[in-house]
Image: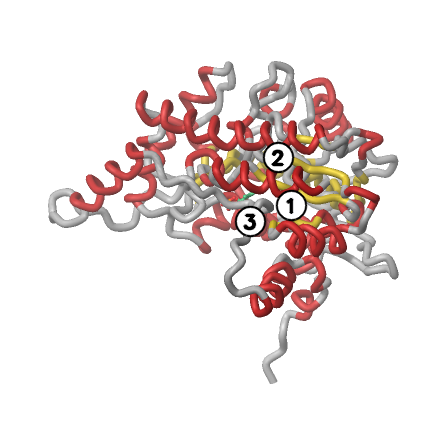
Amino acid sequence: MALANENYLKIPESRFSDEIEKRVNAFKVLHPTTKLIRLGIGDVTRPLPEEAVSAIHKAAEEMLHPETFKGYGPLQGYDFLIDKILKTYRSSGIILDKESIFVNHGAKPDIGNIGHILGRDNIIAIAEPVYPVYENAAIMSGRGGEINDEEKWSNIVYLHCSKENNFVPELPDERVDIIYLCNPNNPTGTVINKTELKKWVDYALENQSIIIYDGAYHAYINEPDIPHSIYEIKGAKKVALEIRSYSKTAGFTGLRCGYTVFPKELMVYTRTGEEIPLLKLWYRRNLNYSNGVSYVVQRAAEALYSRKGRIEIQELIGYYLENAKFIREELSELGWEVFGGVNSPYVWFKTPRNQPSWKFFHELLYNYNIIGMPGIIFGKSGDGYMRFSGFCSYEDTEEAMKRIKSNY
Ligand SMILES: *Cc1c(COP(=O)(O)O)cnc(C)c1O
């Protein structure tokens, strides 16, 4: 009898966004011609930068000829891309070794797979509300421990974020081993500044913990005191790995490419206290579970670092940030309590009249024909909130705000 990995059955269904589609489909059956605006989406909508597409054409052509054809590539990524990544870090004063960079298929697989190289009995700290993958991956890999009546796991320490702490996670009272930080945060769009982030790095140094730093939205940061990389903080190389992606930065959500930094100084420990470079374990893991990222896709990523590529990226991000700012201003004018939308494409807001997320989701859907992202999807402390994003077209964003403002 083939046994299932029952850890996969332990995630509450309510945490999945397919619940949204079920409810939207029910609406569509009754209102087949209504134009719905998806203002909650976490996916980009603008096409790829031209530079990336012409690099794809060129690389595809190379694959056609025996002299330039490429088979398996280097495990950690091609030098042409890794050099660009290192150079970009260097330009902000961060010196990393070539061996520390692992080009990947986007951030999500690494976020989930990092569990392969970490012990089972770690206490994991996760901010809430946050990107659900951190907690779900911990549960599915059997690291959650025991679940209680409140759907909380014994090996997970939940760092409750609320409007009282401006949705910035605070240090836990108890000792934790693995800390997930998402900065700028999804879904709240809020940011951890340098002073706050330093507290986490110092905590990790003191407790021999590690920080898994998700920088998927780093390119959206435009205020001065917000760190673009955790390595801007002294000592961070010893305690943090940093995950980045071209998805939200350059429209690569469908193309799939990113990278993770494992500094050689970053250590984990055996039960007897022996230091092991985490990089070594990740290398071994990749040796057996990966054959690298497509040459063509890595060429597309490389092209983003050209002069024209950089300008195109700035335009893309500017477009989404402009939308986010617009949403932020319009909702604020209605007197709603709004967070994020400055260093992030996400705008997070308290539902009017303190409604639970799903109730307000229906109000938006049925009264305004707008699909928002219910805050509760990101954890219980997200209930009573809603996420909008700047990822729609400007026209749809404007139309959506008009619909809401005309009636509120
Ligand atoms: C979108 C997103 C990712 C995943 O990005 P991919 O590189 O497309 O896998 C990771 N982390 C956060 C917080 C995200 O919002």
Determine which residue is flagged by label 1: 131
Q: Is residue 331 left or right of residue 77?
A: right
| For discs 1 and 2, the disc positioned in front in the rendered view | 1
Which of the labelled discs sits on residue 38, or is there none? 3
- The answer to whether the residue bearing label 1 lies less than 8 angstroms from the nearest atom of ligand 1 is yes
Q: Quadrant of the C terminus?
A: top right
The percent coordinates of residue 169 (x first, y second) are: 76, 33
Report the front residue among 264 and 78: 78
The quadrant of the image that shows the N terminus is bottom right
Badge 3 vs badge 1, beta-carbon distance below 8 Å: no
Here the colouring is secondary structure
Tell me if residue 166 comes above or below residue 141 in the rendering: above
Give the Cα distance between marks 3 and 1.
19 Å
Residue on which disc 2 sits: 213
**Helix, strand or loop for disc 2:** strand
- Which one is in front, 44 or 109? 44
Relative side of 28 to 254, left or right: right
